[in-house]
Image (cartoon, rainbow, N blue to C red):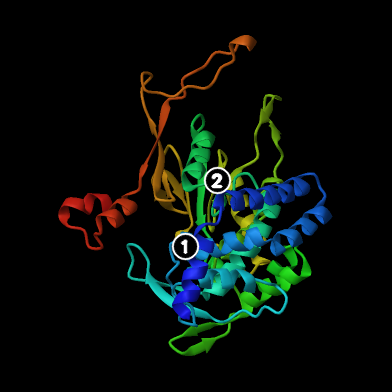
Amino acid sequence: MSNASITKTTPEWNTINWAKVQRKVFKLQKRIFQAVRSGNKVKAKKLQKLLLKSHYAKLLATRKVTQDNQGKKTAGVDGKKALRPNQRLKLVDELRLEGYKAKALRRVWIPKPGRDEKRGLGIPTIKDRAMQALVKSALEPYWEAQFEGTSYGFRPGRSAHDAIGRIYTVIIRKAKYVLDADIAKCFDKINHDYLLSKVDCPQVVKRTIKQWLECGVMDNGIFEETETGTPQGGVISPLLANIALHGMINDVENHFPNTKRREDGSQKQGYKPKIIRYADDFVVLHEDYEVILQCKNLIAQWLRKIGLEIKSSKTRICHTLKDVEIDGRMEKAGFDFLGFNIRSYPVGKYHSGKTGGNPNKGQKSRLIGFKTLIKPSKKKILVQLGESNPPDFYRKFRD
């Protein structure tokens, strides 16, 4: 009987028109996005409820966690690693928010690249992952319509290369001071009450998100409660972290005027600092050192209300073009960000970059005296080589 039932239901899953499924789901997500952009959040929330009940959205969520995602064969606390086609169809029918109860996460320890440390991941069950993928499909377009333009981590259509490209456009014509910082244990310490008050979604969805935040972790048979943070390893966790950090860039940048009067009385345009964030890593760029210090204090204050803080060991102030003395210590020019080294080098007139002139206004381009180069960081090179203790040949990269 079991073989007969599998044979009967297998063609149903394998013959689904996935192009049609994706088209239907995307069309509804687009309507949510447009409703938020036009300021009609009431309509957007109604469309979110419609999407959460959509059979197409449930099919797509199930396919993502059982076939598409890299960790599709990773088991949760129930021990299930993979589903047969007939089991996937059964899971689709079970994806309902009413009466849903999340199970505890399974703790998995993985080594950090290039370090002797390990990072703990909380792995939900397959059903919980599918439910998270379904809720994420409704939340993501709602928040994508609001997220800041210089936030790049874990967002559709954006990558680390986009963040690097944005930094390049900011420093290509004028050297800047840089605050290169990291948020300490960002995913582990986000305040639950703050996040739930900010997520702005239908109440039934908020109750479900609260379950995922407070479901606890099983580590070698020992149960641990999760009082703060979004569990790393969950499908929806990166989106929740972005929601928690949303507003930091705009709030800090808006503390500064867009123009500043020079000593000669002329107006200096574009005085606001530029903040580029990728998940919990961010850089602040500005030509004035005092502005960088102010931004550091403002960001620290902003993070405090979420329960977060800047990681001092990974925070550095430097300059893109020249070596500078910061707090009695010489900091070399350039900085590492997302596995790349970004630095400007002084060069002669034949290699120098130029400012963009406007011939229609009688403006001529002029030499700026330096050239900006982006290349893989030395640390990333060593990680790719697999050298935790590099031989003498590679020691120059480490030093």
The answer to which image quadrant residue 262 occupies is top right
Dot 2 lies on which element? loop
Residue 321, can we see it? yes
The answer to which image quadrant residue 12 occupies is bottom right
Give percent across and percent down for residue 232.
51, 69
Residue 148 position (above or below residue 270):
below
Q: Which one is closest to the eye, mark 1 or mark 2?
A: 1
What's the amino acid at mark 1?
A: Gln
User: For this rendering, which residue is in front, 377 or 130?
Assistant: 130
Image point (51%, 29%), residue name: 173
Decide if residue 376 is on the left or right side of residue 256: left
The answer to which image quadrant residue 389 occupies is bottom left
Q: Spatial distance from mark 1 to mark 2, Cα to Cα?
A: 21 Å
User: For this rendering, which residue is in front, 80 or 71?
Assistant: 80
Residue 20 position (above or below residue 227):
above
Give percent across and percent down for residue 222.
48, 90
Dot 1 lies on which element? helix
Whether tag 1 and tag 2 are in contact, CB under 8 A, the answer is: no
Residue identified by numbered label 1: 67
Decide if residue 79 is on the left or right side of residue 26: left
Residue identified by numbered label 2: 157
Q: Label 1: how many residues lie within 10 Å, few (<14), some (14-19) or many (20+)?
A: few
Image point (65%, 77%), residue name: 211
What's the amino acid at mark 2?
A: Gly
User: For this rendering, which residue is in front, 294 or 108?
Assistant: 108
